Image: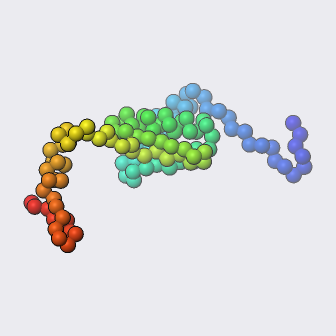
């Protein structure tokens, strides 16, 4: 294939093999999990559908590892992996006792400062 003078050939990526995808997921998941625990989110350049698919699989694996909801979103240039929302209890009666009692004990005084009776 010939190219006009002064123009380099277009960069073509070689797709990952199935083995490379599996290894990538396995090796990236612990790293991403550590980053999530330390900072709450992980951002990576993911500008191809193949990279987005890879990091979505990594996000699923991280969620399974940490046993917490993990979400990922991409904008065509970057991908962010972060913790998802925990399911909210259906009623106040289902809330953990510690959280419910903390809310009942704390109140606002007349100056707008929060005080806790403990």
Instruction: Give the residue displayed 56% in from the left and 31% down from the top.
Output: 20
Q: Nearer the viewer, residue 92 or 18?
A: 92
Looking at this view, name the residue that lies furthest to the front. 110
Q: Is residue 99 above or below residue 28?
A: below
Q: Is residue 31 left or right of residue 118?
A: right
Q: Is residue 98 left or right of residue 38?
A: left
Instruction: Give the residue displayed 10% in from the left and 61% down from the top.
Output: 117
* Quarter of the rendering occupied by the N terminus: top right
- x, y percent for residue 35: 41, 49
- x, y percent for residue 50: 60, 35
- x, y percent for residue 11: 74, 43
Q: Is residue 58 left or right of residue 77?
A: left
Q: Nearer the viewer, residue 44 or 73?
A: 73
**Residue 80 appears in view:** yes
Looking at this view, name the residue that lies furthest to the left. 118
- x, y percent for residue 18: 57, 27
Count up the numbered dots. 0
* Quarter of the rendering occupied by the C terminus: bottom left
Instruction: Give the residue displayed 16% in from the left and 61% down from the top.
Output: 107
Q: Is residue 31 left or right of residue 5?
A: left
Looking at this view, name the residue that lies furthest to the top. 18
Q: Quadrant of residue 95?
A: top left
**Residue 30 appears in view:** no
Q: Is residue 12 above or below residue 19?
A: below
Instruction: Give the residue displayed 69% in from the left and 38% down from the top.
Output: 13
Q: Nearer the viewer, residue 74 or 51?
A: 74
């Amino acid at each position: 294939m010939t190219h006009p003078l002064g123009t380099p050939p277009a960069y073509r990526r070689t797709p990952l093999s199935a083995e490379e995808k599996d290894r990538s997921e396995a090796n990236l998941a612990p790293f991403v999990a550590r980053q999530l625990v330390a900072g709450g989110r992980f951002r990576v350049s993911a500008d191809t559908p193949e990279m987005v698919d890879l990091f979505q699989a990594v996000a699923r694996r991280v969620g399974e590892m940490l046993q917490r909801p993990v979400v990922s979103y991409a904008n065509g240039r970057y991908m962010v992996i972060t913790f998802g929302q925990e399911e909210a209890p259906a009623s106040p009666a289902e809330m953990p006792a510690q959280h419910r009692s903390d809310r009942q004990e704390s109140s606002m005084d007349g100056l707008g400062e929060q005080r806790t009776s403990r």
